[in-house]
Amino acid sequence: MRPRFLFAVVTACMLTSASAYAEDPIIIKFSHVVTKETPKGKGAERFKELAEKATNGRVKVEVYPNSVLYKDKEELDALQLGAVQMLAPSLAKFGPLGVKEFEAFDIPYIFPTRDVLHRVTEGPVGKSLMKKLEPKGIVGLAYWDNGFKDMTGNKPLLHPKDFRGMKMRIQSSKVLDAQMRALGANPQVMAFSEVYQALQTGVVDGTENTPSNIYTQKMHEVQSDLTVSEHGYIGYAVIVNKKFWDGLPADIRTQLEGAMKDATKYTNAISEQENAQALDEIRKSGKTNVHVLTDAEKAEWRKALLPVRKEVEGRVGKAVLAAVDKESAALGAQ
């Protein structure tokens, strides 16, 4: 009897242990570099809520905002190594990774409207770009909007000549480098988390970003002027470590895809409103002079920046640019 009793005890312990192990939630560490108050920050929190609900707690999403885990220069390495499972880096980050086609999103004035942008991100062009990430050990899940960029500086920036000799912070992108050089500025690659201090101390004279990022990072407090130029786009790709993603149970993947789809609709819906509110708060602060370009001034900017596309088309690929033009023409014809 005693051997049978011991066998029963051991078996029960093993089953209890297996049951407890099976109940341990799958952890997704979701790291990003902006605050919770931005469109991306709010999108990450919404995904967490939806994912945990959809999976009945089988998945737990831990969101780490504002570079608390990794700076934007470090986060892609961390994802590829499996130190985090999910990121939402700006599309400019994929050029240095070797997927240069994503830098098409950085070309000034390439998207005449949000509708054209969404035809690109939600259509065949966007899907084909995401597939190019898979050989890098990355699965692309969604495109999230932030919005269109404005320029800030320590003086009014109304004409291209106003940029001459200025040190302007950029993300690591050959297209953004060419953009600033076309304006006569000196581009300075710098991590997002370091920009406020660099502006405050004069290491750089200005930068470009969306109003929501400028406001939540308090950049407007250390810049005397902001120009509503809307010259370029900042968007994000929500990405996941491929080995981790492929190793998930199929039903969990399906539930997470549904949660991501809903979180994407939410994020993209609020981004325009969030940027408008941020610009209004910047005006109200009284710390920054806000300038809106006239039609004539914007035409000057377009003319000065037009050569950038020609300069970088060999890098980002003529086929990608032609596909973007096709979507723009198709929408214009409707």
Image (tube, grey):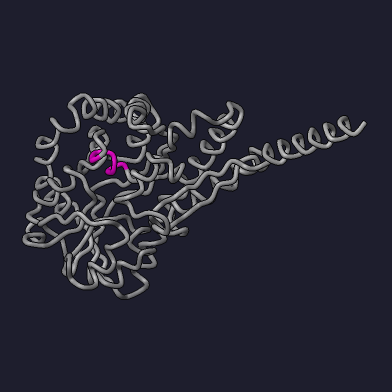
**Residue 300 visible to the viewer:** yes
Residue 67, compared with residue 252, is above or below; it is below
- Give whichever of 155, 290 is nearer the camera: 155
Counting every numbered tag in the picture gives: 0
Q: Can you tell which quarter of the image residue 209 is in?
A: bottom left
* Residue 334 appears anywhere in the view: no
- Where are the magenta residues, as a range? 91-96
Which of the two residues, 162 or 247, is positioned nearer the viewer here? Answer: 247
* Whole-percent x, y for residue 272 in the image: 40, 50
Query: In the orientation shown, which residue stands out farthest toward the front?
Result: 2
| Residue 10 among magenta residues | no
Residue 52 horizontal/vertical position (percent): 62, 44
In screen coordinates, is 250 left or right of 294?
right
Majority secondary structure of magenta residues: helix
Task: Report the residue at 24% width, 38% height from top.
Answer: 95
Up the image or down, 29 lies above or below 276; here it is above
Give the quarter of the image for residue 98.
top left
Q: Position of residue 221 (x, y in %)?
A: 30, 72
Residue 19 picture quarter: top right
In the rendered view, tell whether residue 317 sits above or below residue 262.
above
Q: Quick one: quadrant of the N terminus?
A: top right
Where residue 78 sits: x, y (%)?
A: 38, 45
In this rendering, would 137 be left or right of 258? Answer: left
Q: In the rendered view, does 322 fall on the left or right side of 186?
A: right
Residue that appears at 26% across and 51% down = 230
Q: Using the image, determine if residue 105 lies above or below residue 214.
A: above
What residue is drawn where x is 35% and y is 58%? 213
